[in-house]
């Protein structure tokens, strides 16, 4: 693939910023069509689907932020001179062609495309049918920005496919797919893994845990729990599971207070056997598999553990590998938790809601990767490149 200059890429992004601003009404009108066709029963998906003036501002801001970032392509990673005279230069290089499959969020059409393009990749955007009108207008605006700068529309392509057509595309793509990102729930991830012939990077599944250690500040813990659980239930960084140390001071009283507070805030709370015994009328977890579920709803699980080690084990068995928090004033316990919990982001005394490219200083993100290869956590501009070795010689042969 031809490498575009940083100037050309930034010119396209500047054109797109202006084009988005000039076409606000068309974007909102298209989104209104999607909202009118949508089933309001799925509140989390509805929240992700809706586009407002402030969301358009956010789209423009994300493009500006990426435009301001250093071009990640052709950066030297390492150099080495061998005794035989060979000069070896390891440099960053584009992936080539990326495909992202996502549900409901039109802003992904902006963020995924801006990152892929700035990193000199082509991208196929496969959004959900519920956002068809919104994604179509945004893709058309991308094409306008590309053509204004003399570039092909092929850099950013929208796919309008049903499930069977998507399956065939994954099995027999029209060109090699170098990276496929399913950004959604377990069902979508499994579907892509079963059918894709290219490399798959998993993103989107949360099921995040918070453990309240016996050395925790209780007021801080409650504040963090409510923020992580209720601030944005549609986000993959929302809290789903709460574990409380049975050794915390005034254990029963604090359990009852937290349970009531969650109820008051509209959170359906399921509890384990230990908590159920202490809280009259609480809703007992009847199937242990619920500990592995991501809710994306005003719903959570509340359980008790007797030790830090038990909390770590329960998290590692059940979490989605996204984010986990320990609430504690004990630095030794915090470090043990953060080192041993197998998640992309681990926190001490902070909400899981910060697992976000913008919040973590990465900028716009393609996804939050829960895989360990090739990257874990927010997948920003610097992570949308691979590497290539450049070897310069003068007739050397291997004896």
Image: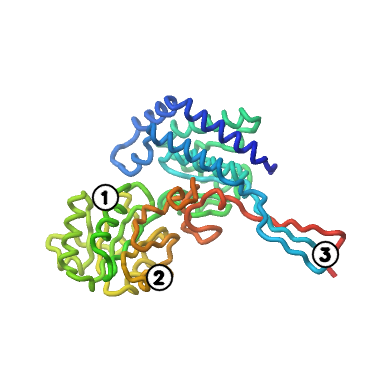
Going 62% across and 38% down the picture, which residue do you hit?
9
Between the C-alphas of marks 3 and 2, the distance is 47 Å
Residue 305 seen from this side: yes
Mark 1, Cα crowd under 10 Å, few <14 / some 14-19 / many 20+, is many
Q: Where is residue 6 in the image (x, y as percent from the top left)?
A: 64, 41
Which residue is at the front of the view, 157 or 163? 157
Going 63% across and 30% down the picture, which residue do you hit?
149
Mark 2, Cα crowd under 10 Å, few <14 / some 14-19 / many 20+, is some
Going 49% across and 42% down the picture, which residue do you hit?
111
Identify the secondary structure beneath mark 3.
loop
Q: Please give the label number shown on residue 298.
A: 1
Q: Which residue occupies the extreme right position in the image?
A: 395
**Pointer 3 or 2: first along the chain:** 3
Q: Name the residue under label 3.
A: 85
From the image, state whether disc 3 or disc 1 is nearer to you: 3
Q: Name the residue under label 2.
A: 335
Relative side of 134 to 120, left or right? left
Name the quadrant containing residue 342: bottom left
Between the C-alphas of marks 3 and 1, the distance is 64 Å
Which residue is at the front of the view, 136 or 73? 73
Going 36% across and 56% down the picture, which residue do you hit?
352
Position of the N terminus, as image quadrant, is top right
Identify the secondary structure beneath mark 2.
helix
Relative side of 163 to 198, left or right? left
Q: Where is residue 177 in the image (x, y as percent from the top left)?
A: 60, 48
From the image, state whether disc 1 or disc 2 is nearer to you: 2
Mark 3, Cα crowd under 10 Å, few <14 / some 14-19 / many 20+, is few
**Pointer 3 or 1: first along the chain:** 3
Relative side of 372 to 319, left or right? right
Between the C-alphas of marks 1 and 2, the distance is 30 Å
């Amino acid at each position: 693939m031809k490498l575009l200059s940083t100037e050309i890429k930034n010119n396209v992004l500047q054109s797109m910023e202006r084009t988005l601003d000039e076409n606000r009404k068309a974007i909102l009108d298209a989104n209104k069509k999607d909202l009118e066709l949508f089933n309001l029963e799925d509140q989390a998906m509805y929240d992700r689907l809706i586009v407002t003036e402030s969301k358009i501002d956010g789209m423009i801001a994300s493009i500006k932020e990426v435009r301001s970032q250093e071009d990640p392509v052709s950066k030297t990673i390492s150099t080495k001179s061998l005794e035989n005279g060979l000069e070896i230069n390891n440099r960053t290089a584009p992936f080539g062609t990326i495909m992202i499959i996502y549900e409901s969020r039109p802003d992904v059409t902006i963020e995924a495309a801006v990152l892929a393009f700035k990193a000199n990749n082509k991208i196929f955007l496969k959004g959900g049918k519920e956002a068809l009108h919104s994604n179509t207008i945004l893709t058309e605006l991308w094409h306008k920005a590309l053509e204004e700068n003399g570039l092909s529309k092929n850099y950013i392509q929208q796919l309008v496919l049903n499930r069977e057509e998507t399956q065939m595309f994954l099995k027999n793509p029209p060109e090699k797919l170098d990276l496929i990102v399913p950004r959604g729930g377990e069902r979508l991830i499994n579907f892509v893994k079963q059918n894709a012939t290219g490399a798959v990077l998993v993103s989107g599944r949360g099921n995040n845990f918070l453990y309240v250690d016996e050395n925790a500040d209780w007021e801080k813990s409650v504040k963090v729990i409510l923020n992580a659980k209720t601030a944005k239930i549609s986000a993959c960084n929302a809290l789903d599971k709460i574990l409380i140390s049975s050794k915390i001071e005034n254990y029963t009283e604090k359990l009852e207070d937290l349970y009531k507070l969650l109820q008051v805030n509209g959170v359906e709370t399921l509890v384990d056997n230990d908590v159920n015994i202490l809280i009259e009328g609480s809703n007992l977890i009847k199937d242990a598999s619920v500990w592995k579920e991501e809710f994306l709803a005003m719903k959570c699980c509340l359980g008790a553990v007797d030790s830090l080690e038990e909390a770590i084990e329960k998290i590692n068995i059940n979490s989605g590998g996204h984010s986990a928090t320990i609430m504690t004033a004990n630095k030794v316990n915090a470090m043990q938790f953060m080192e041993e919990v197998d998640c992309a982001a681990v926190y001490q005394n902070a909400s899981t809601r910060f697992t976000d490219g913008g919040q973590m200083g990465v900028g716009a993100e393609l996804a939050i990767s829960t895989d360990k290869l090739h990257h874990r956590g927010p997948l920003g501009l610097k992570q949308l490149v691979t590497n290539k070795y450049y070897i310069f010689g003068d007739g050397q042969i291997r004896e």
